[in-house]
Amino acid sequence: MTDGSRSDVGRWGGSSWQPSVTPSPEPEPDTRSRGSGRSFWARCCSCCSCRGGADDDWGPEPAGPRGSGSRGSGRPGSRGSRGSGRPGSRGSGVNAAGDGVVRDGMLVVTGVDLMSGRSDQNRREHHTEDYEYDDLIIRRGQPFLVTVSLSRPYSSSDRMALELLIGANPEIGKGTHVIIPVGKGGSGGWKAQVIKSNGQHVDLKVHVSANAIVGKFRFTVRTRTDAGEFQLPFDPRNEIYILFNPWCSDDPVYVEHESWRQEYVLNESGRIYYGTEAQIGERTWNYGQFDHGVLDACLYILDRRGMPYAGRGDPVSVSRVISAMVNSLDDNGVLIGNWSGDYSRGTNPSAWVGSVEILLSYLRTGYSVPYGQCWVFAGVTTTVLRCLGIATRTVTNYNSAHDTDTSLTMDIYFDENMKPLEHLNRDSVWNFHVWNDCWMRRSDLQSGFDGWQVVDATPQETSSGIFCCGPCSVESIKNGLVYMKYDTPFIFAEVNSDKVYWQRQDDGSFKIVYVEEKAIGTLICTKAVGSNMREDITHIYKHPEGSDAERKAVETAAAHGSKPNIYSNRDSAEDVSVQVEAQDAVMGQDLVVNVVLTNRGSSRRTVKLHLYLSVTFYTGVTGPVFKDSKKEVALSPGSSERVALPVAYSEYRPHLVDQGAMLLNVSGHVKENGQVIAKQHTFRLRTPDLSLTVLGAAVVGQETEVQIIFRNPLPVTLTKVVFRLEGSGLQRPKVLNVGDIGGNETVTLRQTFVPVRPGRRQLIASLDSPQLSQVHGVIEVDVAPASGGNFFSGNRGSSRSGENVPMALRGEA
């Protein structure tokens, strides 16, 4: 792809759904099949098509609940008792005449038991028992059990069929209206068999197609006898959620390793890495994909995009739509991006501790949530894709390039004296950037590109006019195959481009004076499987730096860029090397930055050195230079010299921006041979952690207390301090306003929570104020089951916002 455009967004790319003030409900569905004018039985069963007399089409079905993601029954807290859906329950029947009269001899369905309880066999075998729902949640490609209760014993002459419908206009041909005749082979992998008939109760095993649409289906049962036909009325308590299935080898999202499935599908928390390669920071993120309401929010996202139901069985299409919808640009998606430093109209991105609060707010209000940056977009994307059943992980790329001109290189321009020309430097290198890998087969590509696929929901550049990115095969990135869909050129440049330094000449033209080949994508990492360790996955994205394969990949990719001949003219007289060392400093302290020059040649060298220090956002956008230094350094052959640049807190404090990062530009030249010295080095100031302690044992359904201790590292007062507390199975998102904290003051806060699910869980907290952000803490909590034997608590925990809380203890450091 040489024209700079990015790959096609899909056939529904232009169908963005614009919200009203509050989301409008879908129209009531017309559940009659549009497939043909033949009767229900003629359509689902060939042996019934020859029967006459009563083969007229079924009458109008009763108005049912809205489809997947509708804003009616899908909302948290709207579920009623499931009692009426159990055997023995019954409602108004529907016969062929549509008059609701139940005639003698008709086989009436009096109830169904979907065995949807969290500890029931269906939920356990489908690995969905942790979803905080009482509905049946299953994964496609494997069977589930259902018991149908009838008005009389079931006989071999009776005919029964199950139906699943999704969307406002279900159609058999599009897979949105599924008919499964009991005891007969279904179509497309659907099948239902009688495994036991006991009096008026019939136990069925229902096989779900491995290519089924993912979403929330309405469910009903139809019967037919010589006396007439009967349909069980639609009941929202009998709705069925169908998800992708990484346990099924026929599903494109199949994952072979169980340890991977446990980590990338079922783990409700994880680590997200930030900072710089030399100063890696990590924070715990609550994905919360099983929390009540999150699954409805994920399906609502697909609805808001206007994605056709028929496309919702394809993980490539679904992941691409999610990458577009997690950001708000174009389509009023989940999160509003903000890199300005002013978050007064929303939440500082650094203050979020998980995805649940964000997704539930979007579901509840229909409005995009302020604010997000790359790790927030990626954390929410992990939640959504794991919730839908796609194995997903959150990935951090250090020194991540943002290529704005499709040259597939990072171009930095300097004047004749090697001072940066900021008005020309449109490409940027982010200290770190966070995106997602998701696992799937790519039947839309040639063989060899299955496995991990990059999706990136951070809105950086458009793809065919839409702010989305991926899925892009990691294998295509590794080999520089930038013509592969989707968006490979942009992602390749993020991880494996070169940093090219251009100097303005006397005639106004620019010349390449230095190419830094190991400056981009220096470390790519994610949380390791089964532990909280960091795993280096750079090798799956790129060949070893400097190897023939790596150079071939870079130059192959660059040949498809806007500057295909960039490597044909470059100088290489380089015998003086430069290295930058920044001490591990804490916010509020003085620091020293050292530049080490080494003469690797056999002759004496004299270096004229210029140092420029500025603060920088993690996106590579820099502030004005607030300190500089110029020195001339003499180097004997084989020697090294260290140039120190001390920086006081009083010097950098007025200029600090998000993440507490600084950028040192090193430039200069060697007098003897004209070698150009050019290097950029980013470092950050560390922030303190919150200390969390659980006071007492944690038991499902019983109140537990946690203590949070924080010491202000700054000599100034922190104002408008806000704590956040969240943990899946422990505490719904809670926001606590605690007022001001004095300079160097230590404070203690105590809060109670009620665990709702047993097992090892993580409680996560954050602190935010205008003066200090990026402060987090986490503690693992082992929760015991309730003593009464109840594995789950019916209390889902409280979710409070803006609660004013006094400090338990205060003291000076």
Image (cartoon, rainbow, N blue to C red):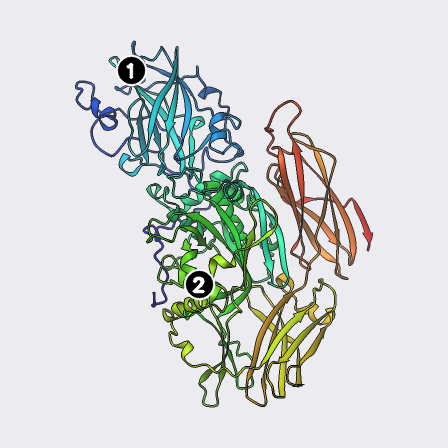
Q: Amino acid at mark 2?
A: Phe
- Would residue 414 be found to the left or right of residue 143 on screen? right
Q: Amino acid at mark 1?
A: Asp
Q: Callout 1: 10 Å neighbours few (<14), some, many (20+)?
A: some
- Look at mark 1 in the image and give the residue it sits on: 158
Q: Say if mark 1 contacts mark 2, CB within 8 Å.
A: no
- Look at mark 2 in the image and give the residue it sits on: 492
Q: How far is the residue under mark 1 from the one under mark 2?
A: 61 Å
Is residue 349 visible in the rendered image? The answer is: no
Q: Nearer the viewer, residue 442 or 29?
A: 442
Q: Position of residue 798 (x, y in %)?
A: 62, 36
Q: Position of residue 128 (x, y in %)?
A: 49, 33
Q: Position of residue 236 (x, y in %)?
A: 43, 28
Which residue is located at x 34 percent, y 57 percent? 8
The quadrant in which residue 731 appears is top right
Quadrant into which the N terminus falls: bottom left
Q: Mark 1 or mark 2, which has the lower sequence index? A: 1
Q: Position of residue 371 (x, y in %)?
A: 55, 54
Q: Is residue 570 above or below residue 791?
A: below
Hey, which residue is sitting farthest right in the picture?
A: 812
Q: Is residue 4 above or below residue 133?
A: below
Assign a secondary structure to mark 2: helix
Quadrant into which the C terminus falls: bottom right
Give the foreground label among 1 and 2: 2
- Would residue 804 be found to the left or right of residue 427 on screen? right
